[in-house]
Amino acid sequence: MLTLYHGVTSTCSKRVRITLAEKGVKWESVHLNLAKRENLDPDYLKLNPNGVVPTLVHDGRVLYESNFIIEYLDDIFPDPPLRPSDPYERAHMRIWMDRIEHVLHRNINTVSWIKQGRYKRFDGMSEEELQAVFDSQATAEKRLILEERLRNGVSQEDMDFAEARVAEVLDKMEEQLQDRPWLCGDALSLADISVAPFIERFEANDVPELTDWVKRPKLGDWWQRIKALDSFKTAFAFQPPEEAA
């Protein structure tokens, strides 16, 4: 039995939904409304102390952090394989996944805070209500980041820095794709799946400098192949029960 705790808009949840669709396995959905901060519910924090999505429960065993989850899924459902057979390429797949998580993801989070208007969730809250939100964060780091953003905002300098770091990753992808259709060779891998939801977010956030396929034509071709995948379409078509009804 596979149960996935996830959010419809969460990029990391989309990684896992793409992988599950590629594997063709059945899974039980537990959708968390992130806007209502259901990810900070005490019962959920018992599963995932970081208070983020997704979390996978497999036969009662709990696993979180999406890049680890998708590797785990490739271990337990090896067909079709989503990791290169060559050890060198497999190591580079993990380098890509690390770069995507710790450079691209970290910086696009800053961009999304402004572009998606996430700060608007807190409009009209009293000081007491804001303090309760800060206190409810799962970790001290998350409390610090949220309070800094709400107290002082995100400067244009911060936005420019974040977008530049993201652009560096995209430039590396363009270079990598010069002689191959996928990031790690001739076949789709977890590296491609790991980054795909972020490219969609760039388009959704209307950041044209990051989706300039004339400037990065190989990346644009790669993106068209990603969007044509049935697994991508399935993952992005998910609707929570309250919206699907």
Image (cartoon, grey):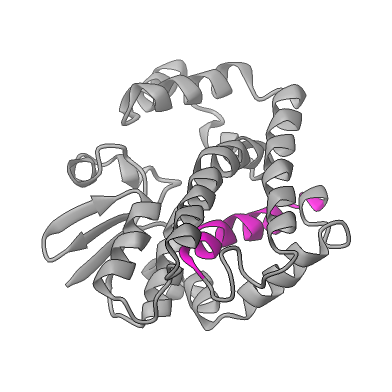
Q: Does residue 60 sit above or below 28 in this rendering?
A: above
Q: Is residue 84 above or below residue 169?
A: below
Q: Is residue 193 left or right of residue 222?
A: left
Q: In the rendered image, is residue 31 in sight?
A: no
Is 206 magenta? The answer is yes
Q: Position of residue 171 (x, y in %)?
A: 74, 49
Residue 16 in the figure: left or right of residue 206? left
- Compared to residue 204, the image places residue 17 above or below, namely below
Q: Position of residue 51 (x, y in %)?
A: 32, 40
User: Which SS does the magenta portion mostly show?
Assistant: helix
Residue 20: percent from left, percent from top: 37, 73
- Which segment did they paint magenta? 189-208
The quadrant holding residue 2 is bottom left
Q: Residue furthest left?
A: 60
Q: Residue 205 vs residue 80: left or right? A: right
| Residue 236 vs residue 132, the one in the foreground | 236
Q: Quadrant of residue 201?
A: bottom right
The answer, for residue 23, to whether it is visible in the render is yes
Residue depicted at 45% across the width and 54% down the height:
91
Left-right relation of 46 to 83:
left
Q: Determine the residue positioned at 69% across, 68% down.
A: 223
Name which residue lies at 68% across and 42% down. 166
Q: Is residue 175 magenta?
A: no
Quarter of the image with the N terminus in it: bottom left
Q: Nearer the viewer, residue 195 or 188?
A: 188
Q: Is residue 110 above or below residue 203?
A: above
Give the quarter of the figure containing the C terminus: bottom left
Q: Relative to the observer, which residue lies in front, 199 or 216?
A: 216
- From this viewpoint, which residue is outermost toward the right? 214
Tell me residue 225's x, y (percent): 66, 76
Give the mark count.
0
